[in-house]
Amino acid sequence: MDPAVGRGGLPLAGEDAPAQRDGDRVLTIPNALSVLRLLLVPVFLYLLLGAHAVGWAVAVLMFSGFSDWADGKIARLVDNQSSRLGALLDPAVDRVYMVAIPIGLAIAHIVPWWIVLTLIGRDALLAATLPIVRSRGLSALPVSYVGKAATFALMSGLPLILLGQFDALWSRVILACGWAFLIWGLAMYLWSGVLYLIQVTLVVRRLPRVRAPGN
């Protein structure tokens, strides 16, 4: 997934004081869902690699995907549910999933390691550009629609591939669909990385370096 600011809906400068305090809330439904998703990462790995309970592992991924969609909707549509913590926590948990799930599937010999290394290498390269972006006074660059579509495809394809491990005809159909999503998502994920690097280049060319206070 592309480095980016998290959920929208945070208070803008000039709004009243109560609205500003709402952005500092910690105990919100979206934040609770994000923490729950984070706690489910080791549960998923145990179910997959320790208990070899593929069905339950798929169920955990399906719940995590639904809760990821739900917390974003709640943050945007329900009053007092957006927060600065959520803006950082939600994409951070997504990052953890994008690393943990492929690694778990590779250890289980379900997906090849080159896919895992490609995903991690792409994210590591983009993460290395963050100091450059921040030196221009920006916290991060916006998420592209290509990046969102790529993340959706990857987070759909990996569970489908896992669900396709059963010895049944329907499972083989699901496995084929999962690989189609994964290949499509991987291509878009790499392309969104190229687009992000282009954005970084434009930022460096057009924005001056911000001096640290006292310099």
Image (cartoon, rainbow, N blue to C red):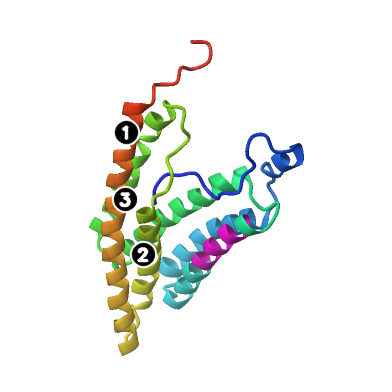
Residue 57 % position (x, y): 46, 71
Mark 3 touches mark 1? (CB < 8 Å): no
Report x, y in % for residue 31. Answer: 62, 53
Residue at the front extreme, as displayed: 14
The tag on residue 192 is 3
Q: Left or right: 131 with respect to 36?
A: left
Q: Earlier in the sequence, mark 2 or mark 3?
A: 2
State the residue at coordinates (68%, 53%).
28
Q: Is residue 139 left or right of residue 124?
A: right
Q: Say which label, 1 or 2, has the lower sequence index.
A: 2
**Which amino acid type is shown beneath numbered disc 1?**
Leu
Q: Is residue 133 above or below residue 110?
A: above
Seen as rendered, the residue at the extreme top is 215
Q: Which residue is mark 2?
A: 153
Q: Residues within 10 Å of mark 2 (few under 14, many from 20)?
A: many
Disc 2 secondary structure class: helix
**Magenta stretch, overall SS:** helix
- Magenta segment boundaries in residue numbering: 64-75
Is residue 41 visible from the viewing direction of this image? yes
**x%, y% of residue 90?**
53, 51
The image quadrant of residue 114 is bottom left
